[in-house]
Image (cartoon, grey):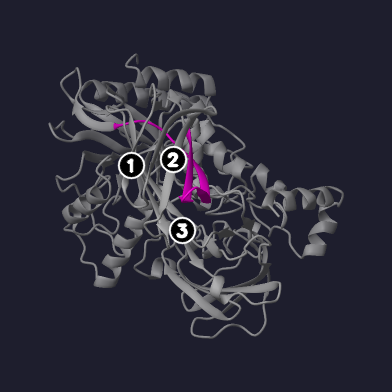
Amino acid sequence: MRNHTIHLFISIIFISLPLNIYAQQHNWQPAENPLMTRWASEVSPQNVHEEYPRPQMKREEWTNLNGLWNYAIVPAFNERPEKWDGKILVPFGIESALSGVKKRVEPDQKLWYHTTFKVPNNLGDGRLLLHFGAVDWRTAVWVNGKKVGQHEGGYTAFSFDVTEALKESSEQEITVSVWDPTDDGYQPAGKQVRKPEGIYYTPTTGIWQTVWLEPVPDVSIKNLKMTPDIDEGILNLTINGRQASDDYRVEAVALNQGSEVGRVSGTLGTLLSLSVENVHLWSPNDPFLYDLKVTLYKGDQKVDEVTSYFGMREVHLAEGPDGFTRLWLNGEPIFHYGLLDQGFWPDGIYTAPTDEALKYDIRVTKDLGFNMIRKHVKVEPNRWYYWADKIGLLVWQDMPNGDDHIGPDEDDIYRKMQSAMGFKKELKDMIEQLYNHSSIVTWVPFNEGWGQFKTEAITDFTKSLDSTRFIDSPSGWADRGVGDFHDIHSYPGPDMPEPEEDRAAILGEFGGEALVVEDHLWIQDFSRAPSHYETSQSKEALHKTYENLLQELAKLKAKGLAGAVYTQTTDVESEVNGIMTYDRKIIKFDEEELKKLHNQLINGEL
């Protein structure tokens, strides 16, 4: 049975039950919390991130395993617990209110999970894949007591073929253990710390993205790699498979609103050139996306099929009409102006309460006239990038930082082999998993010397993984003369580096103008958490200060500045310098006036 049919039936039952009775029967309710978003009330054990989690390689048949699981926190070296502490709502991190638990897991402890599932009726002679969107950080997984795999990395997806571990009986067991030292380890952790304060926030331990089952044929499509070539009007496409031999072939069909505009066939693992008729380009002003259907055949028999989408766009550095190095999109220079986006939520911490909430931040950013988002030291679920593709925003994607930090004038840190290899593996996984998204135009390996090591080598490594996008290495502080950007940070700013012939001049962070909005604060007594940034006393004063910043930014743009990032999308815990409050209930600016200012800045009219 398809996942959505199950959820529709359960939702009908749920609507007839008062919330408190339903929560009592299922032993779940949100934990007490100083702040919640409006989407929190929509979350329940039977309504938690029901959307297909991987829009660029979608199959019809799947089973969502989000919901109530057993959990236990035990000493790190203990075996599987003999009893469970209670229920946790997956995929919310255990520290969050929406998990229903809101407990901390220390570095000397492990978090264990347990749930059951039934084998899909249509599995037949096929294989069953168990997918995890992301689990922070070191994960081991057992099915029916048999270990099926382990994974290190808190931000990238992984999956295991669990077919050989299945039992004859209908009910199967999943057990998961997670160890996460947070800021006491070397691994990429972003802004998570065990003692949140200032610009560092509440950590997330364990499962924080969707868990799901997917039945696939014995020979199946594994992944897609799509690279647009707008000059030739083709999509370069590689389709990789599982267990396929030479007698299998693949066919890809590009569709524009249901009408075929291109078709190509060939063998798995080879580069195919899919010609697209009358190419319609993707841009923030016109985020047009083609649909794609990919089918695997053995002879004339269809074996497997997935649906996807793609955008046709190209970015490069070049001299602009004004003689300065500019960022070009589809053959035209474009000034990048956007928000520093932390991706934290008061009720879900690392996990947005719903898909609509995930979409909301992107929608507001676009509606306010920004054309870019810098996703800051965090990797989002695949659906976040799907919405960026659909709504139309350029994305600068940071690699989450880890290990030690350096100051602006210090040498790169030395990383031990395990730390260095872990960083490179997760960077590689991140780029490979997000490669197909049209919205992503820049990779940022390092931020402000956080974990910065072997800068030139890491820049070359990043470029070897993806030569079609900009590399900003690093954003702010310890510039090493490499990459496509010379990026500085200036608070409140604005400021800029000297223009260069081969690199764009970038202001990677500035602003941070703060405004306290009472009744929308994570820390109710805000006198205990003074802002690190300049604070305005009213909405009018904030708006005037911001307008003055943009006037100065426009002058720098005329002198060669190619892009800028304002801090930030929302308030986050003790920071109150967001365009919105942390609960997303208040936009602190006049929306129409802000949109007008941004359009004038980007279009050179300010």
Left or right: 430 as drawn, with respect to 504: right
- Is residue 306 highlighted in magenta? yes
Residue 494 shows in this picture = no
Up-down relation of residue 599 to residue 157 (above or below): above
Dominant SS type (magenta)? strand
The secondary structure type at the circle numbered 3 is: loop
Give whichever of discs 1 and 2 has the lower sequence position.
Answer: 2
Assign a secondary structure to mark 2. strand
Instruction: Please name the amino acid that badge 1 sits on.
Output: Leu
Residue type, mark 2 in image: Ala
For label 3, count other residues whose C-alpha is less than 10 Å away and answer few (under 14), some (14-19) or many (20+).
many
The residue nearer to you, when weighing 116 against 77, is 116
Mark sitting on residue 177:
none
Asked if 478 appears above or below 142 in the picture, the reply is above
Which residue ends up furthest to the front in the rendered image? 299
Rounded to the nearest whole Å, what is the CA distance between mark 1 and mark 3?
Answer: 26 Å
Residue 345 in picture, x, y percent from top left: 56, 49
Task: State the residue at coordinates (24%, 32%).
Answer: 316
Q: State the mark number for residue 272.
A: 1
In what element is the residue under mark 1?
strand
| 3 or 2: tag closer to the N-terminus | 3
Q: Which residue in the structure is indicated by mark 3?
A: 157
Instruction: State left or right for residue 400 relative to residue 89.
Output: left
**Pointer 2: what residue?**
252
Q: Pointer 1 and pointer 2: residues touching (CB < 8 Å)? A: yes
Mark 1 surroundings within 10 Å by alpha-carbon count, few (fewer than 14), some (14 through 19), many (20 or more)? many
Q: Which residues are magenta?
A: 290-314
Q: Amino acid at mark 3?
A: Ala
- Residue located farthest toward the top when viewing the structure as drawn: 605
* Residue 245 appears in the picture as rendered: yes
Q: Who's the residue at 28% across and 35% down the image?
A: 507
Residue drawn 40% across and 66% down?
A: 183
